[in-house]
Each structure stands twice: as structure tokens, then as C-alpha cells.
Image (cartoon, helix red, strand yellow):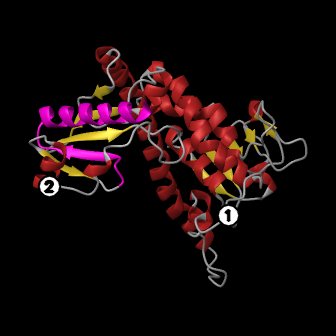
Amino acid sequence: MIPDFLVTHSGGFHADELLSSVILTRLFPQARLIRSRAPEWITPGPDRIIYDVGGAYDPATGVFDHHQRAAPLRDDGQPYSSFGLIWKHYGREYLAASGLPEDHVEALHASFDTGFVLPIDLTDNGALSPSGPLAGLTLPALLETLKPVFDEAEPEADDRAFHSALSIARSFVEAGIAQSAAKLRAEAIVYRAIAAAGQGRVLELPRGMPFRPAIVKAGADHLLFVVHPRENDWCVTGIRRGQEGFELRADLPAVWAGLANGELEVACGIKGASFCHNGRFIAAAKTRAAALAMAELAVKQALSVEV
């Protein structure tokens, strides 16, 4: 079905219908976006997709609401918002329309659902309540700050704010998908580098890129450091143990911490060593040879500490 209308509710808006609108307006740019609760608009018809309103979840008639009794749940029992429902039914088509390689669509659809869509669903349904100083800086909270203030009484204020917020929401979706797609491209490069490294403890990459997910998936637990070129120098980077937190498989040597240039060259005995972060998770060198030498020296120290 190619709809003439995309219908969601009027009044105040939330992240779920905004992000649903990002997907649908990209797929159906010719359709008119209607914000209304009027029965004539939220009644199913062959010319429309209705979402976050309508009181039913019925893909066959183009209705994707989640506020009714017996609202739709994921296979694991977690609730959908309208964004999750729209992503479930239109996300693959959206990714294909974005130019993603066909063999990446399914993997990206799943990873974006887990990492981006599901948190929106849970927050919208009250199943996830961010707390602490950063609670107001989540994407749903930030999008809601774009709503009109309480005493802005102009009749068109809500719709104007919605369309302004829609362009911002679109940027987040497109950037999130671009980052996820880049991780898939990087994965193939990292796998090749792992094969080339064999049982060595240092992984050399042709440029900076996301590397940890591929290292974990490949089961390359022996790797301790990654070396790659930057714009004007080379990096030596530690590998985090877990997805959360900053603990590394191995730290750079303590005597390097916070040193740069000549002082660092003296401390490590490697000409061209140019910087080591005080946190000992990243260092830099002027040449590839110096970066590799620093990585190998760091490996030796790390292994000696283990013994």
C-alpha cells in the first residue's frame, strides 16, 4: 500500500510518534502527514497509515497503536510503542531505501531495534525510567523539550513544534543508522586484520574504526592492543574488557602516563613516541614503527605483570 496520508494524534508529542514519522515520511514522501484525533481521520482506510492513535494494532488495515488493552508485546514480553511497531513492519524497507547493502539489512534491522528502538519503546510505556543527573538528557526527554511551553496558546503551535522536532529526530535516526552501518563495514576489515595478526597480541588496522565488537565476536581474547594511523600520527589503543565501563584487557605502562615527546621517548626508549594519556588507555607515535614498538613493549609489560 502506498498511502496518501500518514495519521498520528494531535496535541503534545512524544518520541515514539516523532520517530515513527521519520521512518514513514522517508518511505512515503508524497503522503500528507495529518495530526488529528478526529474520527474521520483515525478510522482505518485504504489511503492511510495510522499510528500511535486509533485504539488497535492491525497491520492489515494500517493501524499501529499500542495504548489499547491487549496491546502488542515483543516475543520476550516487553512492550511496543508505535515506533517499535513501525520499525517492525517498515524498518527493513527503510534501510533498503537508505542504500544499505542487501546482505546487511537484517543484521542492522535487529541491532538498531535492540540499541535504539527498544529503549524508546520501554521509556514510552513507563517500563524504563531513566534517573539521575542524565535523565533529562535522554533522547525522549530532549525531543519533548521541543514542545511549546504551557502558555503558548497559538492554535498552530503544537503542529509547528512537531514538524520542527521531526527534522531533529530525523537527524538522530539517520546518524544512528549510519553509525551502525559503519560498524558492519568495519567488522569485515577487523576480521581480516585478526586473521593477519594470528596469535600476536597487537592488532594493526588501516585506519581508526570501531573494533571491539568484531574482536569479541571473533573470540580474539588474546589481543591486547590496537594500532592504527590517524591524520598526522599513529595510535596505540587498549581494548576494553566489557561493553560497559573502562577497564582494559591491559593498560599501557604506568611510567608512560601523562608524558609527551622527549620525556616519553626517554621513558619508553622508543624514538618517535609522542604522547600517552594519563589514563593509560591510548598513546600516540609519530611513525608506524614507533607505534608498533610501543604496543609490543606494552604487551611485554602486561604479560610480565600477569605472571
Depicted 148 relative to depicted 85: above or below: below
> Is residue 92 rendered to the left or right of residue 274?
right
Identify residue type, mark 2: Glu
Residue 79 in the figure: left or right of residue 139 = right
The image quadrant that residue 123 belongs to is bottom right
Of the 4 image quadrants, the one containing the C terminus is top left
Whole-number angstrom distance, CA of label 2 to CA of label 1? 44 Å
If you read the primary sequence from the N terminus, does the residue marked by circle 2 or circle 1 appear first?
1
Rate crowding at label 2 as few (under 14), some (14 to 19) or many (20 or more) other CA atoms within 10 Å.
Answer: some
What residue occupies the far front of the structure in this picture?
307
Q: Nearer the viewer, residue 104 or 33?
A: 104
Please tell me which residue is depicted at 25% across the width and 31% down the height of the picture. 296
Tag 1: amino acid: Ser
Q: Secondary structure at mark 1?
A: loop
The residue at the point 78 percent across, 32 percent down is 76
Residue linked to disc 1: 131
Main SS of the magenta segment?
A: helix
User: Which residue range is magenta in the image?
Assistant: 279-307
Rendered location of residue 245, percent (x, y): 52, 48
Where is residue 214 shown, x and y percent of the image? 44, 26
- The location of residue 192, given as percent across then percent down, is 33, 17
Numbered disc 2: secondary structure: helix
Front residue (pair 278, 37): 278
The quadrant in which residue 10 appears is bottom right
Give the labeled residue for mark 2: 263
